[in-house]
Image: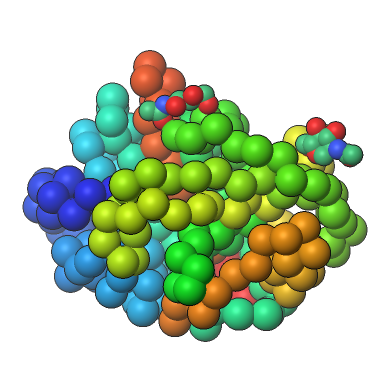
């Protein structure tokens, strides 16, 4: 998703914020920022950044995390709670107040085929890096979703620089919540819907994550706050 060089450079710039983080909160594991994209899928937290900006996230225990971000041109971050990937019912609730490009989404990877998958629950601006192709619509847990795919060509992946497909379930715009958010995601409903439309997954990486992702797209810069608890 982001280059390793960019991750290391920004991670070093971020270390001072760890020192000033409120006491009593779990500190983010800065070691995990330095690991490869592949290795990071085994951590119980996602946390990485790219480019310039102020990105601050704390893990608070019990599946809860909070973030504040203010990205400059080219700047972005992904942070969130992880747990074993697969067919599961996941609940999330909290506050999500984004400006600019980014998502509140469930996120993970499979191999054979190599797929990066997202279940996008909320956003301010959807500005994907590659064009999305609508493959169909389905319902899950009382929500309406569109299913899109996108092709990433020679981009960072869990297998290094590769060409691979992204799957996106995207909640109907009219149902999206901003501010107070809560929801239930039965991942099996999504995986089965994708498969019915001809898009199967491969072997799951160890964890999937409920993340706050924010990124700059040209002059559209991301900022915002989120506090999300996953159970
Ligand atoms: C920005 O968003 C537009 C529209 O979705 C897209 O065409 C473009 O590729 C994006 N650029 C970057 C750098 O993500
Ligand atoms: C599928 O979802 C997209 C995006 O929300 C929407 O534009 C489209 O009208 C939907 N199609 C159907 C058949 O519901």
Image position, residue 33 (x, y; %): 22, 62
Q: Nearer the viewer, residue 176 or 60?
A: 176
**Residue 75 shows in the view:** yes
Image position, residue 190 (x, y; %): 73, 64
Specify whether 200 is left or right of 209: right
When the figure is inspected, residue 225 is found, relative to residue 61, above or below; the finding is above
Q: Quadrant of ligand 2?
A: top right
Residue at 33 percent of width and 66 percent of height: 158
Image position, residue 91 (x, y; %): 69, 69
Specify whether 14 is left or right of 175: left
Specify whether 151 is left or right of 216: right
Residue at 23 percent of width and 66 percent of height: 36
Rendered-image quadrant of the C terminus: bottom right
Specify whether 129 is left or right of 191: left
Residue at 49 percent of width and 59 percent of height: 116
Image position, residue 140 (x, y; %): 83, 61
Residue at 83 percent of width and 48 percent of height: 137
């Amino acid at each position: 998703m982001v280059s390793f060089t960019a991750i290391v450079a920004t991670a070093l710039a971020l270390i001072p914020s760890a020192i000033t983080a409120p006491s009593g909160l779990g500190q983010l594991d800065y070691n995990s920022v330095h690991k490869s994209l592949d290795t990071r899928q085994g951590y119980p937290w996602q946390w990485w950044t790219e480019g310039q900006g102020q990105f601050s996230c704390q893990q608070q225990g019990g599946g809860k995390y909070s973030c504040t971000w203010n990205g400059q041109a080219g700047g972005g971050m992904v942070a969130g709670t992880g747990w074993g990937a697969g067919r599961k019912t996941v609940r999330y609730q909290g506050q999500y107040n984004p400006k600019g490009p980014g998502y509140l989404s469930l996120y993970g990877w499979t191999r054979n085929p190599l797929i990066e998958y997202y279940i996008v629950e909320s956003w301010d601006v959807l500005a994907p890096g590659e064009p999305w192709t609508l493959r169909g619509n389905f319902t899950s847990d009382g929500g309406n979703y569109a299913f899109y795919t996108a092709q990433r060509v020679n981009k960072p992946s869990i297998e290094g620089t590769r060409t691979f497909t992204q799957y996106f379930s995207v909640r109907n715009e009219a149902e999206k919540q901003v501010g107070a958010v809560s929801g239930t995601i039965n991942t099996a409903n999504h995986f089965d819907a994708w498969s019915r439309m001809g898009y199967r997954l491969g072997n799951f990486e160890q964890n999937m994550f409920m993340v706050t992702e924010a990124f700059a797209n040209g002059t559209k810069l991301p900022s915002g706050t989120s506090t999300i608890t996953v159970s």
